[in-house]
């Protein structure tokens, strides 16, 4: 990388994020591997990402309530995302899954679904992150279906629904606080590009108004990712507001 900051910015635009605790050699190895994959355009500009390297396969949904699914394979220790999407999926579904593909090198985060649903609008955006993992939707659906034979299970389904709704409310509040703190710390009108690079722990620190602390720890323990998030200042003028705000 002849111009490190510029290169990290360009890679971000291509949907290649530095992973957590990833060293430069491992990162470059992953970059070369990803650039052999098909290029998909990101339609929604809200994250500032223009393209994503990922294989997209149209496939009839195995489970009716899943329009698409992103799975991860490993080649030489490098995570490779692959998207399977129904031909009948809503228009924003691919962008949603592209967010999961972009986040592939990062550890699981409760905020990833919130970020993915930023590509949607209205109630889908507001209520979409009700489930943090696909199996949660499966459990609720199975409980409701079994309630036809064992009516008592409808009470269990109601309890699960209330739990998911309460968790959504609490996590949404923390997510929104984190976005506000990101905007303040980075002096950014749109915090979403920065949020893509943050871990769950860092998002929680931002949500508790400790953004500077999160960045100091990142600078010390994760310098390459810190350099990429610092490079985003060069693209913030290209990133529009989300239509619905955050």
Image (cartoon, rainbow, N blue to C red):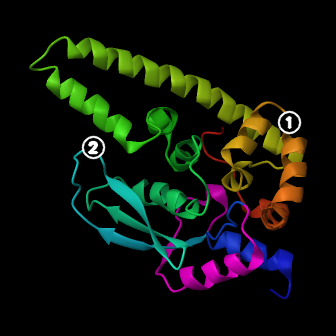
Q: Which mark is residue 223?
A: none
In-image side of 66 versus 174 (left or right): left
The image quadrant of residue 69 is bottom left
In-image side of 73 versus 6 (left or right): left
Picture coordinates of residue 190, whole percent (x, y): 74, 49
Find the distance from the CA under tag 2 to the CA under tag 1: 38 Å
Judged from the image, the secondary structure of the residue bearing numbered disc 2 is loop
Q: Which residue is mark 2?
A: 65
Crowd around label 1: few <14 · some 14–19 · many ≥20 (10 Å):
some
The image quadrant of residue 203 is top right
Q: Quadrant of the C terminus?
A: top right
Picture coordinates of residue 195, whole percent (x, y): 70, 50
Residue in view at x 27 percent, y 11 percent: 155
The image quadrant of residue 235 is bottom right
Residue range of the region highlighted in magenta in the rendering: 21-49
Relative height, residue 60 to residue 38 (above, below): above
| Magenta-colored stretch includes residue 89 | no
Q: Quadrant of the N terminus?
A: bottom right
The residue lying toward the viewer, choosing from 8 and 13, is 8
Q: Which residue is mark 1?
A: 210
Picture coordinates of residue 36, whole percent (x, y): 51, 86
Closest to the camera, between mark 2 and mark 1, is 1
Residue in view at x 84 percent, y 79 percent: 4
User: In the rendered structure, are the residues bearing label 2 and label 1 in contact, judged by CB atoms less than 8 Å apart?
Assistant: no
């Amino acid at each position: 990388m002849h111009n490190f900051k510029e290169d990290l910015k360009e890679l971000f635009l291509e949907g290649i994020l530095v992973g957590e605790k990833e060293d430069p050699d491992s990162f470059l190895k992953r970059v070369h591997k990803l650039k052999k994959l098909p290029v998909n355009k990101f339609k929604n500009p809200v994250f500032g990402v223009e393209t994503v390297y990922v294989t997209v396969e149209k496939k009839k949904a195995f489970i009716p309530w899943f329009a698409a699914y992103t799975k991860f394979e490993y080649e030489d220790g490098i995570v490779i995302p692959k998207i399977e999407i129904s031909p009948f999926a809503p228009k924003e579904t691919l962008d949603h899954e592209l967010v999961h593909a972009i986040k592939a090198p990062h550890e699981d985060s409760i905020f990833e679904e919130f970020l993915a649903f930023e590509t949607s609008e209205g109630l889908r955006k507001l209520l979409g992150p009700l489930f943090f993992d696909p199996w949660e939707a499966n459990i609720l659906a199975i409980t409701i279906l079994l309630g036809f034979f064992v009516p008592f299970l409808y009470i269990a389904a109601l309890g699960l629904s209330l739990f998911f709704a309460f968790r959504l409310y609490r996590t949404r509040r923390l997510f929104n606080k984190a976005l506000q703190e990101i905007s303040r710390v980075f002096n950014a009108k749109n915090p979403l590009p920065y949020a893509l690079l943050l871990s769950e722990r860092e998002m929680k620190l931002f949500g508790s108004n400790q953004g500077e602390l999160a960045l100091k720890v990142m600078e010390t323990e994760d310098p390459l990712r810190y350099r990429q998030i610092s490079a985003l200042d060069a693209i913030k003028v290209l990133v529009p507001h989300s239509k619905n705000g955050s």
